[in-house]
Amino acid sequence: MAQDGPEQFDVVVIGAGFSGLYAIHRLRQQHSVVCFETGDGVGGTWYWNRYPGARVDIISVEYSYGFDEALQQEWRWPEYFSAQPALEEYANHVADRFDLRKHIRFSNPVTRMRFDGKTNRWHVHTANGDHVEARWVIAATGALHAPNEPAWPGRELFQGQVLHTTQWPREGMDLTGKRVALIGTGSTGVQATPIIAEQAAHLHLFQRTPAYSMPSGNRPLDPEFEADWKANYAERRQQMLQTWGVSLIDYPTYSALDCTPEQQNEILEKAWRSKNAFQLLTAFSDVMVNPAANNVVAEFARNKIRGIVKDPKTAELLCPTYPIGAKRLGNDKGYYEAFNRDNVTLVDAKSAPIVAFTAKGLRTTEAEYEFDVIILATGFDAVTGAMSRIAIEGVDGQTVAERWRDGPTTYLGAMIAGMPNLFMIHGPLTPAAQAQMITAGEWQINWTADIIEDLESRGVARIDTTPEAEQWWAQQVDAAAAMTVHNLADSWYNAKNIEGKKGGFMIYIGGFPEYTRACTEAVAGGYRGFVLT
Ligand code: N01
């Protein structure tokens, strides 16, 4: 029978990444749920990012769901740091195991949404022409989803292939014998470089800002280590939530400046070899908050680069001058070593920026280069991009993109004033990628679902927040960022990775316990900062 008007649901979930999948699972216990996903499969970040070398930098036993004891006991991770295929396989397993696919409409991105203030329901429209109405929307759209592709002229002229790292073909790409340009030296470029270098006839890596990176130390998962985790999983998950980044790495209490140079070096050598991605940043208590302490670690890392890279000029060009950790620390398997190969050339795209695509390759202010393939590892319109690119219209007709023109405003990273009943997971001004995202996402989804269930039990149809609450939260976010070295570099953390993008610090870095305390206290304090009607 033909249906009149929009389909009715209690909840729309946007995105079937790791957070979206758990949101479906949690919410559908008491609600009708539909999820719209842009891709044709589940996994979000780990669906899109299949470039060579894509791998997580958090140990697999942590970077996984904790909501189901049987799942975490039965699942076997092959390696300490999971590669993209293992993470995508896990997402697919979870979708099947918990029968989530029936709620998901694939290849069907949400294009626009409008809140109807009379019915207190969202009208959600998609690319395939779906129109649904729901009381609640959970946007699990991903902090690193919308690609940043520099708008150099002439892309249509280029006779070879050009692609962003999120557009890597599922069947892979054979780069054997190809002249390849890789642009960008963030975590993505750092991971892809050594693998592409092995395949390509020649790789030119275009570097605008050098990267700090340390060896990932990936290895097959030790069965004893795995058994120990599985025997203590529930307790460890709780402990993780009590740590700054939702990860059980060592957090020492001593300052770098209280150690002799010999002690500093010994500690840093141990951290370098620790096989734990972030151990350099937590080698001392003050690496991220004291520029002098930071410089001890930064100089150690620069000396590692000078020690690995044989050509002194290339080594110096690879040495960053900003504080280590201010931009995301890379995690690699042979990044610096790749520059010792004859078929790898580092191009300084800072002193001679890329200005155009040409029929045969790229032009910088200084030279022309010929390529068969150009790979853009140029990152993301991070944190805000995925939401701003959907036309989301709130109570006063203003869209999210308009509201965020000068930077994102949110309360607790979860709600936007004037956009009632819309909750974001890993939204702007949450800890996002500074916390281990699967466990942090589960926490945020549970907090959100508890709110929805509580409001429904009390007959409350609408929850909103206020500009004052947003302002208060912005102050907390800025104060936390100001205590660190993060603003001493331009990055996606502070919206300075894209020319013209506005905004202050995009994520809350006061630590996950502080974040959850603020969220929990707001609700316990009578929904402080929210407006219920
Ligand atoms: O993106 P990025 P990413 N001309 O923004 C350069 C997570 N992640 O995809 O630094 C020339 O960090 C840009 O230069 P600059 C992780 O959270 C995790 O690498 O702006 N170059 C930069 O070098 C990470 O932080 C993992 O001067 C241009 C690069 O492109 C986040 O994702 C792995 C340019 C972009 O670096 C994003 O990482 C991968 C231009 N016009 C990603 N525009 C792991 O878990 C940009 N660039 C290990």
Image (cartoon, rainbow, N blue to C red):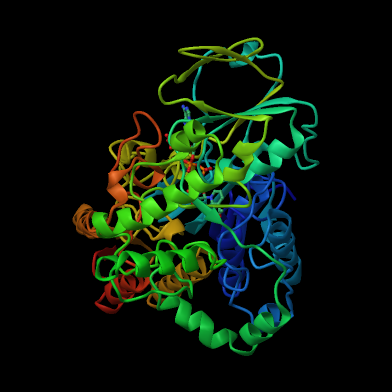
Q: What is the x, y in percent for residue 60?
A: 63, 68
Residue occupying image coordinates x 58% and y 60% = 20
In-front residue for pair 272/191 = 272
- Residue lying furthest front: 262
Q: In the drawing, does residue 418 fall left or right of residue 194?
A: left
One can see residue 165 in this view: no
Q: Tell me the quarter of the image containing the C terminus.
A: bottom left
All told, the count of numbered labels is: 0
Q: In the drawing, does residue 293 fall left or right of residue 215?
A: left
Residue occupying image coordinates x 46% and y 57% = 433
Q: In the drawing, does residue 75 fall left or right of residue 48?
A: right
Q: What is the x, y in percent for residue 491?
A: 38, 42
Q: What is the x, y in percent for residue 210?
A: 45, 38
In-front residue for pair 177/157 = 177
Q: In the drawing, does residue 191 fall left or right of residue 114?
A: right
Q: What is the x, y in percent for residue 367?
A: 53, 12
Residue occupying image coordinates x 33% and y 36% = 402
Residue occupying image coordinates x 60% and y 42% = 109
